[in-house]
Image: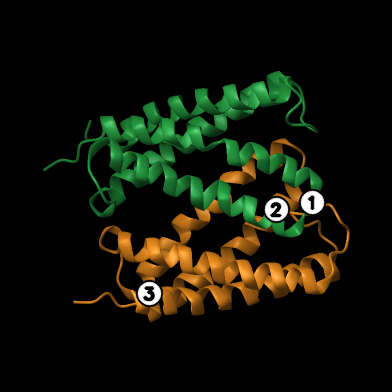
Chain colours: A green, B orange
Amino acid sequence: MKSGLAVGIIGGIGMAIAATIDMVLSVMTGWLVGYPSIETVAIISLGANFFWGIVFGIIYARLYDSIPSKGIWKGLIYGIMIYLFSNIYLVSYGIAYGDPFVINWNIGAIGGIYVFITFGVIVGILYKKES
Amino acid sequence: MMKILIAGTIAGLFSGVLALFLTLINNAVIGLPHIYSTASIIPIQNIAINEILLGVIWGIIFSIFYSILYNSIPGQGVSKGLVYSMIVLLFSHIRWVPYNVYYGFAPSGLTSAYIGFLMFATYGLLLGHLYKPPK
């Protein structure tokens, strides 16, 4: 695929499914507390991650040439970069301020790495830049 | 490598100091909730250490990625730094806003986004101004 938008849509679907499984299981098992119903968590997780997957896909196409490595590894590096900028950034401030709810939420954010691995693998395999 | 680390440190320090003042105004003066804490008033020294220290640490980390991605970021000089910092803002702050709104933390989520915007705009302008890649 040569379109960042198209790759982002597919990557967003993958990301949304991975994130929703993570969130629903976390709430069902009591790992995360203070959340609304599982249905609400699932709908928000699906919608938000699908939307962000599209945005991340478009940015991936723009930054493609400068991301180190090739193919699937290039996608994975990009996925880990987003994870660092997004989740680990959030976690670092949550830990520094030491709020119990934020720390609890952060456990979910740290565990979310496989969401970005899923996204990275999908865009890494699918996206081929026009030569 | 040294040039980008210095640029990242300076830009991170300035954006951290700005975040400190904005957080103080929001939390202690206006009384708005803080995104990372449910405490009504956070001690000033905690805000100072957290914002400045993390501002510098993340300033350095983001700058390393800036030097790697440099050629693919649109713009020149200061505007290139600004574009990059807005991408980082999107990943680090804006991405969480819908969750904050849905889960009932709209005021703190929106406060975080606007502090983040000013913080990263400052960071990007400084980084774009200070860093010139080796030829």
Under circle 2, the secondary element is helix
Q: Which residue is mark 3?
A: B4
Alpha-carbon span between mark 1 and mark 3: 33 Å
Dividing the picture into quadrants, the one containing residue B101 is top right
Residue B74 shows in this picture: no
Q: Residue at x 43, y 49 (%)?
A: A81
Label 1 close to label 2 by CB (< 8 Å): yes
Residue type (three-letter) at the residue carrying disc 3: Ile
Using a 10 Å C-alpha cutoff, classify the residue at mark 2 as few (fewer than 14 neighbours), some (14 to 19) or many (20 or more). many
Which residue is most to the right? B40
Alpha-carbon span between mark 1 and mark 2: 7 Å
Is the residue B105 above or below the residue B11 in the image? Answer: above
Q: Position of residue A86 (x, y in %)?
A: 54, 49
Q: Are marks 1 and 2 on the same chain?
A: yes
Label 2 close to label 3 by CB (< 8 Å): no
Of residue B128 and residue B4, the one placed in the foreground of this image is B4
Q: Position of residue B33 (x, y in %)?
A: 81, 56
Image disc number at residue A94: 2
Image disc number at residue A99: 1
Query: Where does the C terminus of chain B fall, quadrant-wise?
Result: bottom left
Under circle 3, the secondary element is helix
Using a 10 Å C-alpha cutoff, classify the residue at mark 1 as few (fewer than 14 neighbours), some (14 to 19) or many (20 or more). some
Query: Where does the N terminus of chain B fall, quadrant-wise?
Result: bottom left
Residue type (three-letter) at the residue carrying disc 1: Asp
Which residue is most to the left? A131
Q: Are marks 2 and 3 on the same chain?
A: no
- Check the residue under mark 2 and report the chain it is in: A
Residue type (three-letter) at the residue carrying disc 2: Gly
